[in-house]
Each structure stands twice: as C-alpha cells, then as structure tokens.
Amino acid sequence: MTGFIPSGERADKDLAFMLRYENVAWYDGAEVRILDRRVYPARVQFVRCATHRDVAQAIKDMVTQSGGPYLAAAMGMALAAREAQGLDAKAFGTYMEDAAFTLSHARPTTMARMIGITKGCLDAAWKALDAGRPADEAVMEQAVATIDARYRKSAQSAKFLVDMFPDNGTVMTQCFAETIVGTMLRECRARGKTIKVICPETRPYFQGARLTASVVKDMDFDVTVITDNMPGYAMKAKKVDVFTSAADVICMDGHIVNKVGTFQIALAARYWGIPYFVTGTPDPGHPTIGSVEIEERDPADVLSAMGVRTAMEGVGGFYPAFDITPPKLCDGVVTDQGIFPPYDLARYGEKGSAEL
C-alpha cells in the first residue's frame, strides 16, 4: 500500500534505514509487517502479524520499541478494519472498539498515548463506513498521515535541540529516542555542525548499542558505545557537553518517565554540570507522576544478555522497564514549540498540539 505515502517530500527523507516508515511497521492490505528491533542490526528481519491481536502481542513482546509501537498500533487498527469487513455497523463498531482496547493496552506505561492513537483510527474507520469506502484504507491513510506529522514535529524539535549543541561537541544519549535521533543528526548535517555521540548500551535489550548507535553510524556521524555502568565516568573522560533523551511520558508536573537508567545518567549530568534536555510532548493525560504505572517486565530478561545466561540458576532478577527523573534534574523540555522549563509545561498546552 505504497499509495498511502504522503505526496511531496517525505518527512523521513535522508533518515536511517530503520526510521523509514515502511521499516518501522507497515500494513500491506493483508498483514502488518514490523521490523524486529530485538535483533537489528545483526539481522534484518520482520515479524509478520496476521491479526490485530498478533500486532498487540508483538508490541508486548518488544518486537518494536521507542516510537515504533505507536505506528504498529495504528497499522494494527487498519488490519482490524480489514478483519471486520462484512460485519453490520453495530458488530463492526464492537469489533473495532475491542481491537482499539487490545492494541492500546498492550503495554501499560504508554497506554494514555496509545488510546489517543487508536481513537483517531477508530474515528477514521467510522467516517469511511459512512462514506461507503474501505475502512482499512481510511485507517491506513490516518496512520501514515499521523506518522508523517509526528516526524515533522520531531524535525521542529530537533532545530531547538541542536541549538544546544556546541560545534564539535559530544552528546550522550539514552536508550533509543528514534525519530529525534535521526532528525537531530539531519539538522546537524544541514547546519554543517559536527558532533560525536556516546550511547550507553541500554540493557537488557541493548537499544542504545543496537539501535541508536546504528542510526548514528548509518547517518555518518562519530559514535561510541559504553556499558550502562560507565556514564558517570565517561561524561568527564569523554568531555560530554549535553545529555539528551526522549521520554515515554512527560507529565505536566515535569516528571520524566523514560527507559530505566535515565535517572542515574541525569544525576551524573547534574554532578558534572552537564545540561540534560528531554525531547517530547508534555502529556495532559498525565497531570502528575502519580497517574503513571511503571511497567515491570519478566525478571528473567536481566539474567541473560543477547540470549546467553549470565547469572547462576536460582538467582533472582528485577526489571522495571522505566524510571522517573524529577523535574529538578532537567534543564529543559524540548518540543516543536520551543524549549520549556519542566515546571512550566502548562504553557506548552496553551500553544502546542497533541503528539502521535
């Protein structure tokens, strides 16, 4: 269904392979294809989902991470619309609402944003039904238009973020910020600004080593991977100028929920006097940190590394997927509307817009 790509210049132009729309998640009219980020770049393989429930399971199983699940959920809604073809209006509505719930609740911490995405797809499906056109095509159009808009917002945010980078500076990242990594590097290239990037590996899925570092290398910038216990020392030894991350949730009270490990890097950055800028959209669905459920995943995942067990049998594990960074450790929330103090995010709500 390449006909659903927006006309004109694509917002993923000149970005790395894994950031191209079709290489994140894609509905082809029969199934949804999702790049398996658990094994990339060692292997380039796609998980093929025959039903929307398969898509939800893939999201739950971490086949795609960072911003990938949002597009996967939207593509899953297109697949659900195809599954519901031929049902009467009432049954169609019930089926699609059930699909929206299944997809949006695949992972608890990002549920609020997922609900917004699936609702947009549900609205598109109803409009198509009323107009007598295929609902899956309408939902696909909605999904592609939304990701294109999200990439364009990210490109705007990147302009403000890159303003914070000194030329020939060194930037430390955390986990995989996906689109903002690609757009910030594209912006640096457009300005002729040279930077070096340091990526903590991000156990247990190694998103920093496998995904962020791959995007940086793919876009021809200098990149170095460190282990997760090195950021404090590496910040001084490698003369880091800026620490930046994306966020799974930015609460309106300024608390930042991101991949576990972000908090400790922010602490080290504050100790060394290095600014920390988080990129993303403040979420009115989370007025305070008390509204966020921190997902805890299978403890067995921390007892091995890339499929090789590292701990003796009988040893226990603990795996919170995210941690919480308080606003006092953040120097600014970088959005498409500018950089906001973490204690003044309501002002973004007055001038900003909802994110995919």
Image (tube, rainbow, N blue to C red):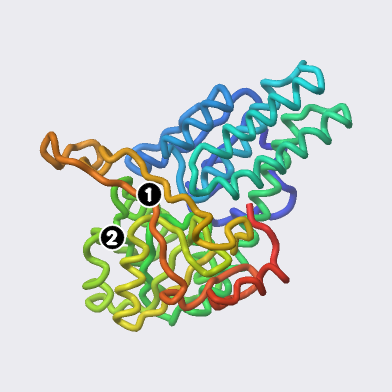
Q: CA distance from mark 1 to mark 2?
A: 21 Å
Residue type indicated by callout 1:
Ala
- Kindly give the residue lying farthest to the front in the view shown: 290
Residue at the image point whose x is 67% and y is 21% from the top: 83
Q: Which comes sooner in the sequence, label 1 or label 2? A: 2
86 left or right, relative to 61: right
Q: Where is mark 2, residue-wise?
A: 225
Please, what secondary structure does the residue beneath circle 2 have?
A: strand
> Where, by quadrant of the figure, is residue 79 drawn?
top right
Residue at the image point whose x is 59% and y is 49% from the top: 112
Quadrant where the image shows the N terminus: top right
Where in the figure is residue 216, as x and y percent of width and height? 41, 59
- Kindly give the residue lying farthest to the left in the view shown: 312
Circles 1 and 2, Cβ within 8 Å, touching? The answer is: no
Q: Foreground residue, 253 or 28?
A: 253
Where in the figure is residue 339, as x and y percent of width and height? 58, 76
- Kindly give the residue lying farthest to the top in the view shown: 86
Q: Where is mark 1, residue-wise?
A: 321
Local packing at callout 1 (Cα closer than 10 Å; few below 14, some 14-19, many 20+) is some
